[in-house]
Image: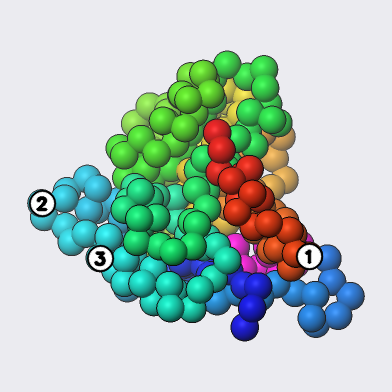
Amino acid sequence: MKEFFSILGGMGTIATESYIRLINHRVKIKRDQDYLNYILVNHATVPDRTSHILNPDKCESFLPYLIDDIKQQNKLDPDFIVMVCNTAHYFYEELQKNSQAPILHMPRIAIKKMTEQYPNEDKVGLIATRGTIADGIYKNEIEKVDKEVVLGGSEIQDLVDELIYQNIKEKGIVDVTLYHRILELMHDNYGVNVVVLGCTELSLAQEKGDNHPYHVIDAQSIIADVTIELATQIRQGQDKNQIIKHYQEV
């Protein structure tokens, strides 16, 4: 197969399914051959990312598992790689060093889109796993564009954990009411007009419960659109290195 990309998924599987659904339904098609060429690696047994980031001495690292995936993909020679897990970007630099293909930096691309869409917002809300909050992936990208990061209090993180782990990861369901409540609290109690969804489970919640009045930056939705644009342009014969560089720049 030529002109294809690889997806490192399974972190978690339901969120990866959401990403696949987005790219399949958003791409413009008139026939079967218009869909995108891709390989999905649904590596569900990758150790929990947040557990390792918060307790690196006690919890197994997920890095070796992802490096193995990258080395397998090197043999297949994809045009680029999408890693549909925000927290896994903790090891982005190490993974890119091991990859022959460029790995799209989902948080960076999402924040670049945020600056284009909401240029006048001085402070930005962020909800994510405790691991993503602790490793500063999104905080660093947001501060690079001179925005203040607002995390909310402990009650916000408790509700986010409940939505991500107790609902989506453990039960495979989305509590839309809970999701809307989190956005409402971030807006009303913490004064943010834009909330970044720094977890693909939260992106799934947005997909299922987008009927709310709040402004969100949905990294998975954004990376789905970028995936389609890149794959389409590469299929049309454009220089993939120049195209990808445009999306990767801050």
Residues at discs 3 and 2 in contact (Cβ within 8 Å): no
Which class describes the residues within 10 Å of circle 1: few (<14), some (14-19), or many (20+)? few
- Residue 27 in the figure: left or right of residue 240: right
According to the picture, the residue beneath numbered tag 1 turns out to be: 236
- Residue 100 in the figure: left or right of residue 115: left
Q: From the viewer's perspective, is the residue at label 1 or at label 2 nearer?
A: 1
According to the picture, the residue beneath numbered tag 3 turns out to be: 64
Residue 51 x/y as whole percent = 24, 53
Q: Quadrant of residue 213?
A: top right
Q: Is residue 22 magenta?
A: yes
Residue 240 x/y as whole percent = 64, 57
Q: From the viewer's perspective, is the residue at label 1 or at label 3 nearer?
A: 1
Q: Quadrant of residue 47?
A: bottom left
The furthest residue to the left: 57
Would residue 218 be visible to someone looking at this image? no
- Residue at disc 2, secondary structure: loop
According to the picture, the residue beneath numbered tag 2 turns out to be: 57
Residue at the location (64% across, 78% down)? 2
Q: Which residues are magenta?
A: 16-26
